[in-house]
């Protein structure tokens, strides 16, 4: 089965084509362009180069979150559009799981994305078994301290939040440094994670593809803050009477 995977969760964009255990094609682009400019041309180039069409694709993989809200929406919308015509199954992949999927060996990989506002999206995986050790979460970088202190295996960080983690935990015993050039997300990782999801019966119909942001958007946060302030003002006014 041929899997077309899309990675648009961060600043870079990528696509990959996987057939069984063979990576047929992969493209990674981090040149400052928007995903809306680059994603569909990248997919078209990949299919044209391999002499394939969307009819040849048996599964689509795409990051569902966490990550850039806009980037996730672009990737999900593109995959929905491509998959809809033949109702091709889709795998909504965890961005953090996809980050871990392309790393192997002995140890623990901590995947971290910069979530702004002093937080990171993070999760941890065992490299040897690909078993998840920590669920996806959005939290201050300090929140992973207890996990790292109790981790028995060597640890390294990947993702665009890795630098933040190395600044905080880089001197901790057992922490290994990953070269910055290989910390980013890869569409091949999305493809591998999608392959596992399909094997586990976790693929969904195109219409069921939904983002999993792991936190409220800025607009939702601002609305919640306004509503809380209004309720507080109303309560204070009632008390004063």
Image: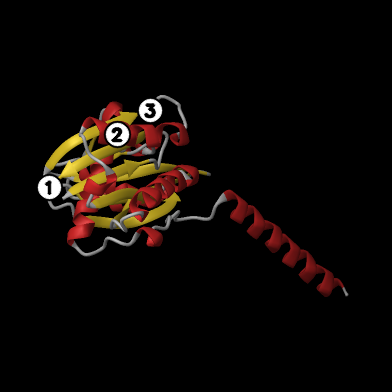
Closer to the camera: disc 3 or disc 2? 3
Disc 2 and disc 1: Cα gap in Å? 25 Å
Q: Residue at x 70, y 58 (%)?
A: 226
Residue indicated by mark 1: 20
Tell me the SS state at disc 1.
Answer: loop
Q: Quadrant of residue 203?
A: bottom left
The residue under the point 26% across, 32% down is: 48
* Sequence-first disc among 3 and 2: 3
Marking on residue 30: 3
Q: Residues within 10 Å of mark 1 (few under 14, many from 20)?
A: few
Q: Quadrant of residue 196?
A: bottom left
Q: Secondary structure at mark 2?
A: loop
| Residue that numbered label 2 is attached to | 183
Mark 2 vs mark 1, foreground winner is 1
* Left or right side of 98 for 32: right
The Cα atoms of the two marked residues, 3 and 2, are separated by 13 Å
């Amino acid at each position: 089965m041929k899997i077309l995977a899309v990675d648009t969760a961060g600043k870079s964009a990528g696509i990959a084509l996987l057939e069984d255990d063979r990576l047929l094609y992969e493209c990674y682009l981090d040149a400052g362009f928007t995903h809306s400019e680059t994603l569909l041309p990248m997919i078209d180039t990949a299919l044209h180069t391999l002499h394939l069409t969307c009819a040849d694709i048996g599964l689509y993989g795409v990051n569902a979150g966490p990550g850039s809200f806009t980037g996730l929406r672009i990737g999900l919308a593109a995959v929905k559009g491509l998959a809809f015509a033949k109702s091709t199954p889709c795998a909504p992949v965890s961005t953090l799981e996809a980050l871990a999927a392309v790393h192997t060996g002995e140890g623990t990989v901590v995947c971290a994305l910069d979530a702004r506002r002093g937080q990171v999206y993070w999760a941890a995986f065992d490299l040897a078994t690909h078993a998840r050790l920590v669920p996806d979460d959005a939290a201050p970088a300090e929140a992973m301290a207890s996990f790292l202190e109790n981790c028995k295996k060597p640890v390294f960080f990947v993702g665009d939040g890795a630098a933040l983690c190395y600044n905080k935990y880089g001197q901790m015993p057992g922490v290994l440094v990953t070269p910055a050039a290989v910390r980013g997300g890869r569409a091949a990782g999305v493809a591998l994670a999608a392959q596992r999801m399909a094997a586990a019966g976790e693929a969904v119909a195109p219409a069921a593809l939904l983002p999993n942001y792991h936190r409220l958007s800025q607009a939702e946060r601002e609305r919640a803050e306004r509503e809380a302030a209004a309720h507080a003002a109303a309560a204070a006014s009632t008390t004063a009477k």
